């Protein structure tokens, strides 16, 4: 009897303990919440600071620790591992590496707790919003890096080795706080092998483009493949045709939400009609309107279509699906008659923001890491490992063999020179962007005509003009 | 130990046991609802802690929002079709595998191989919605690589150069999604109804058979009334699923959080998420959330009331 009652008592106590434990779960949660509010405290006084010199402008301490976190997305994280190895070799540091897709999940508590990593590639769907970090003083000012001597040429400052627009893009409230490292160019892509086999030449005008598509159709292929489930891609083509035909003013009119951005803009109508011609002449890859980006890109890799639109991440994204001898080639969007910009002009912009946290234990190491990223050696490493370009001007060693797609993008960028442009409205007005994409999807499915597209796009612009941000977002 | 002390101990035990879960429930379920309600009167962007009070602006904007109204309409369509089609099919199959066999001497049994069918029908239920989306993505693929298009093209019913763009056709997309939900749900409700049917005493069926009732009559006059409780519960569950639909629509259809083409497969949850996370209109999205909550509650009450019947005891 006594045994039984003891047992019963224990059971009860156990239960109470368990329910109390359940209650305790809330305690660490509260801890996180309060950490959000406070987070302050003195930065951990690290040992990692040495005397500065011309070779060591930020005073990296030999033998210190480096903590690097990178977004492991389309570019993988092999490039970062190669960098860390090079950094450790030069400075005698020990780097710890984390490649992850959950930047917020892994880092928010560390930022709040005052022990963030030394370098972060803050990218992907779960990046921490930059403006939020900036407002809570979590971002180190990277201006000293810009003013430090370039590793390739000590007579030059780092800021003079960057492609135009990089600094503006990484500036918040007048401070340069994020280095957008990857330079992306947008346009069409084709297989050099297929074109050689069929005797086609890369088109420079839209009529030639349609002619190649028609030849492809005769040969039993599709002309243009596009990532129909994501009208973002075909929108790039439409918008680039507008910018090239109407010139930079036509592009700015859209970004600045002018009342005649689309309606009454001859360049816009001509661009939409040109894309619609592909649909009307039945030159699309059958079914492409409903395919995802991987499905349509893979079909294109299987020589089922002549062209596909995309940014220069395409080659790395399709690495596994691309046949060895595919010979991927970049093509600037071909020209309509009477275009204001030359054929070589391309949409280009910087992405993939790298930051150094203000409270990093080894801030000097972080800054030096950023400076090293902007050297030709590291830029070349990135181009080789991640098959993409960086914001370093001529940042790829010409002696190094790149994959054909990346190589063709390097060449196109060089040929374009100062003839690059970039739309800003997708970052400023996501609702307008989505509305225009919806219209493009309808256009490609032949459910609306170009005039209707123009009407819908203008309606989206007019609606965005009522956005409270519209007053601040202006470009000239 | 005296009786009183024991009683007090029990009271303390129960309180200790209930308070912690209650606190958790209040903190993580009720409080967010209250907060959502509060945010729905602000112009909160979801990205900054500052916002202004805007009164019922969000709600009046919601009334004029054609996309949201379209989504509401789609939800209502699904609300009618998902439960009706799923329950009818499940009932039919359940009846066939349990009582549909050609009766031997007074025997009530399922069609031949019914045990096997029961297992097979349950298969879809063990798949998660994410897998389902991938699976049916391949079925509905818009080029000849898709299962449906591939078969139709082989049969010569569809032109190879113009395959059917299932999920990209405004008039088809919602029905394609409905089929996935039904395919997924029928097996589970079949098993549920089977269990209910098996608890019906066999002599009732035998009596019906002796009185000369056919299969249809047996079903309508005997099985269905005895199963009414299960059917009612199923209707509520399926109704709630039809009000949601977020996972399937957002992964299978085009557009930011799905809803495409051109909003033809939009449901309230997809419009809400797009406004909340992508457009930076979190206050507005909270207003949608409140509307959804109210609608779901009203519908649950209506379903439970409308399907209330006198209980048949056996």
Image (cartoon, coloured by chain):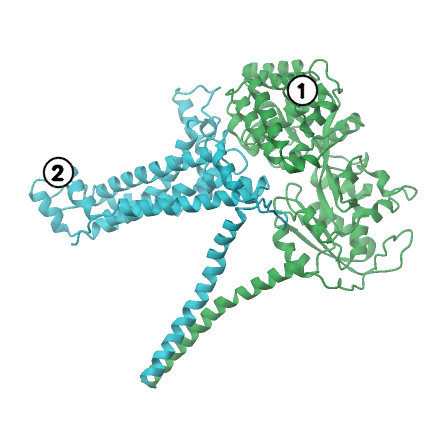
Shade of chain A as shown in the rendered figure: green
Quarter of the C terminus of chain B within the rendering: bottom left
Q: Give the spatial CA distance, label 1 vs label 2.
A: 73 Å
Check contact, mark 1 vs mark 2: CB within 8 A. Answer: no
- The answer, for residue B170, to whether it is visible in the render is yes
Rendering coords of residue A335 (x, y %): 70, 18
Q: What crowding class fits label 1: few (fewer than 14 Cα within 10 Å), some (14-19), or many (20 or more)?
A: few
Q: Which mark is residue B214?
A: 2
Q: Is residue A227 visible?
A: no
Q: Position of residue A186 (x, y in %)?
A: 68, 29
Foreground: B49 or B56?
Answer: B56
Q: Quadrant of residue A338?
A: top right
Q: Which residue is mark 1?
A: A196
Tell which of B77 and A123 is nearer to you: B77
Number of callouts: 2
Binning the other alpha carbons within 10 Å of mark 2 as few (below 14), some (14 to 19) or many (20 upward) gives few
């Amino acid at each position: 009897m006594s045994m039984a009652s003891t047992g019963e008592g224990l059971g009860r106590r156990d239960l109470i303990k368990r329910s109390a434990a359940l209650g305790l779960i809330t305690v660490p949660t509260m801890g996180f919440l309060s950490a959000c509010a406070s987070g302050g405290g003195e930065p951990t006084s690290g040992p990692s600071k040495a005397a500065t010199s011309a070779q060591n402008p930020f005073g990296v301490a030999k033998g210190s620790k480096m903590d690097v976190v990178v977004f492991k997305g389309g570019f993988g994280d092999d490039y970062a591992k190669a960098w860390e190895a090079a950094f450790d070799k030069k400075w005698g540091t020990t780097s710890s590496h984390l490649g992850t897709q959950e930047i917020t999940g892994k880092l928010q508590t560390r930022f709040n707790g005052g022990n963030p990593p030394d370098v972060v590639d803050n990218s992907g769907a779960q990046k921490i919003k930059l403006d939020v970090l900036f407002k809570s003083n979590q971002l180190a000012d990277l201006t000293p890096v810009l003013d430090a001597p370039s590793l390739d040429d000590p007579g030059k400052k780092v800021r003079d080795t960057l492609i135009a627009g990089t600094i503006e893009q990484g500036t918040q409230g007048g401070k340069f706080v994020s280095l957008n490292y990857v330079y992306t160019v947008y346009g069409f892509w084709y297989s050099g092998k297929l074109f050689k086999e069929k005797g086609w030449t890369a088109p420079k005008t839209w009529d030639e483009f349609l002619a190649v598509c028609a030849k492809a159709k005769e040969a039993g292929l599709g002309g243009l493949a596009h990532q129909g489930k994501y009208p973002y891609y075909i929108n790039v083509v439409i918008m680039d045709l507008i910018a090239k035909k109407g010139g930079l003013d036509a592009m700015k009119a859209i970004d600045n939400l002018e009342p005649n951005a689309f309606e009454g803009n001859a360049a816009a109508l001509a661009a939409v009609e040109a894309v619609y011609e592909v649909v009307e002449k039945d030159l699309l890859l059958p079914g492409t309107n409903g395919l995802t980006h991987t499905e349509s890109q893979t079909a294109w890799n299987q020589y089922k279509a002549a062209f596909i639109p995309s940014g220069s991440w395409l080659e790395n994204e399709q690495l596994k699906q691309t046949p060895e001898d595919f010979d991927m080639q970049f093509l600037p969007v071909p020209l309509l008659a009477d275009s204001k910009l030359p054929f070589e002009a391309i949409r280009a912009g910087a992405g993939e923001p790298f930051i150094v946290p203000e409270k990093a234990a080894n801030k000097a190491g972080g800054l030096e890491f950023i400076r090293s990223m902007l050297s030709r050696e590291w830029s070349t490493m990135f181009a080789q490992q991640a098959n993409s370009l960086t914001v370093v001007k001529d940042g790829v060693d010409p002696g190094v063999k790149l994959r054909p797609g990346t190589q063709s993008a390097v060449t196109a960028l060089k040929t374009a020179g100062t003839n690059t442009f970039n739309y800003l409205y997708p970052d400023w007005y996501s609702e307008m962007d989505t509305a225009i994409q919806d219209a493009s999807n309808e256009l490609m499915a032949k459910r609306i005509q170009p005039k209707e597209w123009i009407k819908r796009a203008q309606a989206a612009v007019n609606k965005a003009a009522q956005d409270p941000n519209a007053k601040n977002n202006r470009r000239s | 130990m005296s009786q009183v002390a024991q009683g007090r101990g029990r009271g303390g035990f129960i309180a200790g046991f209930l308070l912690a879960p209650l606190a958790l429930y209040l903190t993580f379920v009720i409080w967010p609802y209250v907060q959502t309600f509060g945010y729905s009167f602000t112009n909160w962007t979801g990205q900054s802690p500052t916002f202004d009070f805007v009164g019922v602006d969000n709600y009046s904007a919601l009334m004029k929002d054609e996309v949201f109204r379209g989504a509401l309409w789609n939800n209502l369509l699904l609300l009618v079709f998902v439960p009706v089609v799923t329950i009818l099919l499940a009932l039919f199959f359940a009846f066939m595998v349990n009582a549909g066999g050609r009766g031997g001497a007074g025997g009530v049994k399922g069609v031949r191989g019914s045990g096997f069918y029961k297992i097979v029908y349950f298969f879809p239920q063990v798949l998660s919605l994410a897998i389902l989306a991938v699976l049916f993505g391949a079925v509905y693929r818009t080029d000849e690589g898709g299962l449906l298009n591939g078969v139709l093209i082989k049969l010569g019913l569809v032109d190879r150069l113009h395959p059917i763009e299932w999920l990209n056709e405004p008039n088809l997309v919602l029905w394609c999604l409905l089929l996935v939900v039904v395919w997924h749900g029928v097996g589970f409700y079949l098993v549920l109804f089977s269990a209910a049917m098996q608890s019906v005493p066999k002599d009732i069926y035998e009596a019906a058979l002796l009185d000369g009732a056919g299969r249809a009559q047996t079903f309508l006059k005997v099985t269905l009334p005895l199963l009414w409780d299960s059917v009612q519960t199923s209707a509520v569950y399926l109704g709630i699923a039809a009000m949601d639909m977020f996972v399937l629509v957002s992964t299978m259809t085009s557009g930011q959080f799905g809803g495409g083409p051109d909003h033809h497969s939009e449901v309230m949850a997809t419009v809400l998420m797009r406004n909340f996370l992508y457009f930076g209109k979190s206050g507005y999205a909270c207003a949608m959330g409140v509307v959804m909550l109210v609608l779901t509650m009203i519908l649950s009450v209506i379903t439970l009331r409308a399907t209330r019947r006198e209980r048949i005891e056996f």
